Image (tube, grey):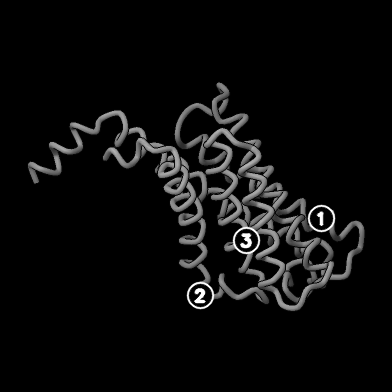
Amino acid sequence: MEFFRNASARTALRFAIVSGTGLGIGAFLFKSAIFIPTLSSFQFTISSVTAGLAYAGLKSGSRRNALAALLVWCILLTSLAGPFHYWLLVLSVAYVSAIGFAIYLYLRTASKPFARGVVRRIALAGIYVALMNGMVVFVLQLIRLTPSLSYPAIALHHPFDGVLLNLQYGAWIGTAVGFGIESVEYVISRLIKYPEAQDQTIQAV
């Protein structure tokens, strides 16, 4: 278990579990559709990976690394959607910035008295991600940007359909991400705080 005393290993583990839980709930609900950029369910991939990168980077103590990782992710997202277009870049930056900010708010408030307890912290993550996910669509609709086929959730007939759908998706993703955060921090604390006990248990089995 000495491996997890390394900061880089803990960062990688945080990213894998936090993003993995979001992708997991998405795969459970929509199966492989979450990996198709032309479907609204692709938000599960965008938001989950963004949350994992933001959380892992910010927990490592380096905002610069977190921002650099999110920038690379923005560029990759833009290229995944097809030939470059400024609108795709706007959407990628908007979604990544919103979810990254949600994780930042979570880290700033998760230790507050009102967020004591695992259930409250998971709910807090769900609320933040849902609100930011919905706000992205609301703002884009307000300024009347041309909708893109890569993000059909903001191109629905009713002006608030996209907002409501994104709030719903955000709540699912945020709750899963919150569970992932609690899980990975528990695992890390156990592996680092009680390495000898863990090793003895493994040997005994």
Q: Would residue 185 be found to the left or right of residue 72 on screen?
A: left
Choose between 186 and 1: the one closer to the eye. 1
Which amino acid, by three-letter code, is at mark 2? Ser
Q: Would residue 58 be found to the left or right of residue 74 on screen?
A: left
Task: State how far apart marks 1 and 2 are (Cα).
Answer: 27 Å
Where residue 65 appears, as percent x and y from the top left, is 61, 43
Label 1 vs label 2, nearer the camera: 2
Circles 1 and 2: CB atoms closer than 8 Å = no
Where residue 126 appears, as percent x and y from the top left, is 58, 46
Where residue 173 appears, as percent x and y from the top left, is 56, 54
Place residue 45 in its image quadrant: bottom right
Seen in the picture, residue 190 relative to 24 is either above or below; the reply is: above
Place residue 147 in its image quadrant: bottom right
Which amino acid, by three-letter code, is at mark 3? Ile
> Residue drawn 45% across and 43% down?
8
Task: State how far apart marks 3 and 2 are (Cα).
Answer: 14 Å
Seen in the picture, residue 159 relative to 114 is either above or below; the reply is: below
Q: Quadrant of the N terminus?
A: top left
> Residue drawn 78% across and 68% down?
88
For disc 2, the marked residue is 32
Choose between 89 and 3: the one closer to the eye. 3
Q: Residues within 10 Å of mark 1 (few under 14, many from 20)?
A: many
Where residue 53 appears, as percent x and y from the top left, is 57, 49
For disc 3, the marked residue is 46
Seen in the picture, residue 164 relative to 41 is either above or below; the reply is: above
For disc 1, the marked residue is 138
Q: Earlier in the sequence, mark 3 or mark 2?
A: 2
> Residue drawn 66% across and 46% down?
100
